[in-house]
Image: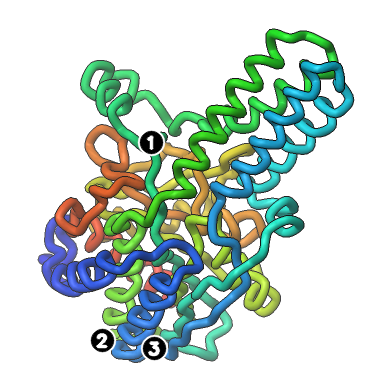
């Protein structure tokens, strides 16, 4: 690789391709399991075929939204709290307790029992492509997702931006985003506990929290998709640029599987479908997962761990390998941050695979335009996305050399 290409700002070789991918797909409404998600998958497949991959679109059973199952469980908590206030304390304990457990199960990627029991699945559309040495024993799976989230009032960034302007030292010291999902669980948990003890104050607080969460979920569930240029068409674009790089200079001794998943914004539904089909044939001892999610914010970040309920750290050795590749390539990579949200990387992480996730933040450690209608191509830092592409390529070549 030339010295010009190794410089952090020298991403011109991929810039046009990255822009083309993001701009072509951002105009397609891509809610999870929608026809727009399917149309985007077909375009991505064709791009990957153009760059020498064996690629196909695979549809998998999936649910369309996290907002409706969680909103329904919040509504159940409200009903249970109302019943407890009228003397039916056992109903309050059981109903709200089950709601709290169901929400925790859903957002943490457990069995997701509520949506499986009470909601009807649709189809998500995954793009799966093979490149590299197809018969190699060692495998790198690179993940991205092409569906887009709906917006909602809870995603407004006014408070975060005020904090960044007025308390920069506090923001700089923060190692993770606030655990907002805990508030959603806290509502029904308080209703259940207060119903058991007979304390009306905590029960009313739990009702208020549950009502607030219900309103937020309805607001999200009724909205259309945002353009999702950064989240996560930058990851998709990097995936396609990687395919081109591996076509131009193939790797030996490494099979590379490129996965652009659908329904990530429904809490990783697409990648769970991929896991059901592919994980049985991917040995943990020789398979690595590298997830790209929202890499066009300016400063690349190697997440140390993630988890909405319980934090899970990524594999230390694989994180160090990725960080070492960044150093060798002269790519700045911020470390020490954890996420209280979840990405597709959480699925292989929970199954014991050596995994890592690369995201990005701006100078204030925020993800600008996150889940907002302003997440358009004009606001993407393509230099950052280009560095993510080069970093994943370096990781692939490092694994192949080993």
Please state if 78 lies on the left or on the right of 20 as rendered.
right
Q: Find the distance from the CA under tag 3 to the CA under tag 2.
A: 12 Å
Choose between 276 and 137: the one closer to the eye: 276
Disc 3 is placed on an element classified as: loop
Disc 1 is placed on an element classified as: helix
Q: Which mark is residue 53?
A: 3
- Graded by Cα atoms within 10 Å as few (under 14), some (14 to 19) or many (20 or more), the crowding at tag 1 reads few
Which numbered disc, 2 or 1, marks the residue that appears first in the sequence?
1
Quadrant of the rendering where the N terminus is positioned:
bottom left
Quarter holding residue 271? bottom right
Choose between 172 and 61: the one closer to the eye: 61
Measuring 28% from the left and 81% from the top, which residue is drawn there?
Answer: 244
Location of residue 213 in the rendering, given as x and y in whole percent from the top left corner: 55, 32
Query: In the rendered image, which residue does mark 2 sit on?
Result: 248
Which numbered disc, 3 or 2, marks the residue that appears first in the sequence?
3
Measuring 74% from the left and 9% from the top, which residue is drawn there?
Answer: 200
Q: Find the distance from the CA under tag 1 to the CA under tag 3.
A: 41 Å
Task: Please state which of the two labelled residues, at mark 1 or mark 3, is closer to the viewer.
Answer: 1
- Graded by Cα atoms within 10 Å as few (under 14), some (14 to 19) or many (20 or more), the crowding at tag 2 reads few
Task: Please state which of the two labelled residues, at mark 3 or mark 2, is closer to the viewer.
Answer: 3
Residue at the far right in the pictured view: 90
Q: Find the distance from the CA under tag 2 to the CA under tag 1.
A: 45 Å
Q: Which mark is residue 266?
A: none
Quarter holding residue 380? bottom left
Please state if 200 lies on the left or on the right of 127 as rendered.
right
Measuring 34% from the left and 87% from the top, which residue is drawn there?
Answer: 46
Measuring 31% from the left and 37% from the top, which residue is drawn there?
Answer: 366
Q: CB atoms at circles 3 and 2 under 8 Å apart? A: no
- Graded by Cα atoms within 10 Å as few (under 14), some (14 to 19) or many (20 or more), the crowding at tag 3 reads many
Choose between 340 and 139: the one closer to the eye: 340
Query: In the rendered image, which residue does mark 1 sit on?
Result: 153
Q: Is residue 394 above or below residue 294?
A: below
């Amino acid at each position: 690789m030339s010295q010009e290409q190794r410089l952090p700002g020298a991403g011109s070789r991929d810039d046009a391709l990255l822009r083309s991918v993001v701009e072509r797909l951002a105009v397609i409404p891509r809610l999870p399991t929608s026809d727009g998600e399917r149309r985007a998958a077909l375009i991505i497949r064709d791009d990957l075929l153009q760059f020498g991959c064996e690629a196909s679109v695979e549809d998998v059973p999936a649910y369309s939204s996290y907002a409706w199952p969680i909103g329904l469980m919040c509504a159940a908590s409200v009903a249970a709290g109302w019943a407890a206030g009228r003397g039916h304390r056992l109903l309050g304990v059981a109903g709200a307790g089950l709601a709290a457990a169901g929400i925790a199960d859903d957002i943490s990627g457990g069995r997701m029992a509520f949506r499986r029991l009470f909601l009807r699945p649709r189809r998500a559309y995954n793009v799966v492509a093979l490149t590299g040495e197809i018969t190699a024993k060692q495998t790198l799976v690179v993940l991205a997702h092409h569906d887009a989230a709906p917006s909602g009032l809870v995603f407004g960034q006014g408070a975060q931006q005020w904090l960044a302007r007025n308390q920069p030292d506090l923001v700089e010291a923060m190692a993770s985003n606030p655990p907002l999902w805990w508030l959603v669980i806290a509502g029904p948990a308080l209703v259940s506990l207060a119903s058991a003890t007979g304390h009306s104050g905590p029960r009313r607080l739990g009702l208020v929290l549950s009502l607030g969460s219900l309103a937020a979920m309805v607001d999200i569930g009724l909205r259309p998709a945002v353009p999702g240029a950064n989240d996560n068409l930058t990851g998709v674009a990097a995936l396609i640029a990687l395919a081109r790089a591996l076509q131009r200079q193939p790797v030996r001794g490494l099979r590379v599987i490129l996965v652009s998943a659908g329904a990530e914004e429904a809490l990783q539904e697409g990648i769970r479908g991929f896991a059901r089909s592919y994980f049985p044939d991917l040995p943990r001892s020789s398979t690595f997962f590298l997830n790209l999610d929202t890499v066009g914010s300016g400063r690349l970040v190697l997440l140390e761990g993630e988890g909405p309920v319980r934090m899970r750290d990524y594999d230390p050795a694989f994180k160090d390998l990725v960080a070492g590749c960044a150093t060798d390539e002269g790519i700045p990579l911020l470390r020490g941050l954890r996420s209280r949200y979840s990405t597709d990387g959480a699925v292989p992480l929970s199954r014991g695979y050596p995994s890592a996730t690369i995201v990005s933040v701006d100078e204030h450690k925020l993800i600008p335009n996150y889940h907002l209608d302003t997440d358009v191509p004009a606001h993407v830092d393509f230099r950052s996305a280009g560095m993510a592409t080069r970093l994943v390529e370096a990781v692939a070549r490092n694994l192949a050399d080993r």
